[in-house]
Amino acid sequence: MIIKLLYTIIICQLLACGNTKEPVSNSPAEDSVEVELNKEVEIIGLLYHRFNESKYPSTSISKVLFRQQLSYLKKNQFEVLNFSDAILKLRSKDTQGKYIVITIDDAFNSFMEHGFPIIKEFGFPATLFINTETVGSGDYLSWNDLKILAENNIEIGNHTHTHDYFLDMDTASRQQTFFEDVYLAQELIKSNLNLKPSVFAFPYGEFDEGMIEIVKKMGFIGAAAQNSGVMSVYSDLYALPRFPMTDHYGKLELFSEKISMKALPVIRKVPSSTISQINPPVLKLILGHVELDFNQLQCFIQGGNCDVTQSGNDPYTIQISTNQKLGSRRHLYTITVPSKDNNQWYWYSHQWVFPADK
Ligand SMILES: [Zn+2]
């Protein structure tokens, strides 16, 4: 009862509900959102889940391939950062270059057994996003394991307590439920590891604007989504893209292609939301004026291609559509396009979510 009351007070402060005063700001994050982002920095986020668990092909990567990927990074002298340092680079005005971030979601045992020893061997940092409800049960790491990882250059991030499908919840209660869940995870990490995570990852990469506001106001400096793409000045710091890395999508040839991508400069997208009431949805993008060879532009959705039309007056305004109804919960529209001199490819993707009907 007391905990419930505490939650209600805090959520009211965060959401400025009732008669409460100004929303609480407990970190520099809220102010820093306005800081001009660094145009010279691009960061490739890599997203892993399970290691050497071939019975989960959609989320697992073999030890052999993971080692090959890290060898490639080392050989090509990429600088690898953890997620919070990547965000600081994006916010910084005086750094430049291309960086890599290794992130692992869900904290399965196989990370400790197969993934972490390889990361340690290469001396790279990484960020592990943990959902606290399952810690120590089934095939999830224990608090003791997490403590060892945290002492060995693995940053711990918040991935909620329950790892729930928050978008399936009633919109009236969603924000409060989400806040309570993230808050509880933060408390458990603090009491078990004596750490206060500064970064967050949305379960399944699903969110709405209200959830992003809560993550900002709780003091996190940035958050990860699950659509593929390159982090840059054009990214929302609270919905940063990551390339999923599995045995299929992480094959060395594809891996080297993806880490050589640049961020397509999307100045504005309509709609801004990932949730669509219309199926199939239409996405409009307004692009920055970099030199692009639009003749080679490609558009993909799962299992096929999508259609792209350019506005008659302005080739940098494009509309993406498909005539097929999208059949499952989450879909990506992915765009790739080369520079005019063909030396560089740009990448952008937008995730659509169709929450379960209520
Ligand atoms: Zn997850």
Image: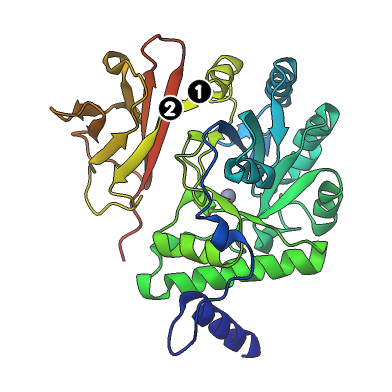
| Front-lying residue, 139 or 100 | 100
Give the total of numbered labels. Answer: 2
Q: Residues within 10 Å of mark 2 (few under 14, many from 20)?
A: some
**Cα gap from disc 2 to disc 1, whole angstroms:** 6 Å
Which residue is located at x 45 percent, y 53 percent? Answer: 206
**Tag 2: amino acid:** Trp
The x, y position of residue 83, in whole percent, is 66, 44
The x, y position of residue 279, in whole percent, is 22, 46
Query: Helix, strand or loop at disc 2?
Result: strand
- 71 over 349 or under it: above or below: above
- Pointers 2 and 1 in contact (CB under 8 A)? yes
Label of residue 261 in the image: 1
- 128 over 212 or under it: above or below: above
Which circle's residue, 2 or 1, is located before the other in the chain? 1
Query: Helix, strand or loop at disc 1?
Result: loop
Which residue position is annotated with label 2? 347
Work out which quarter of the rendered image holds the C terminus and state it: bottom left
Q: How is the image coloured?
A: rainbow
Work out which quarter of the rendered image holds the N terminus and state it: bottom right
| Front-lying residue, 35 or 162 | 35
Quadrant in the picture for residue 281: top left
Q: Is residue 54 visible?
A: no
Q: Is residue 309 visible?
A: yes
The x, y position of residue 226, in whole percent, is 50, 43
Q: State the residue lying farthest toward the left.
A: 312
Quadrant in the picture for residue 40: top right
Which residue is located at x 56 percent, y 51 percent? Answer: 223
**Tag 1: amino acid:** Met
The x, y position of residue 73, in whole percent, is 70, 21
- 285 over 74 or under it: above or below: below
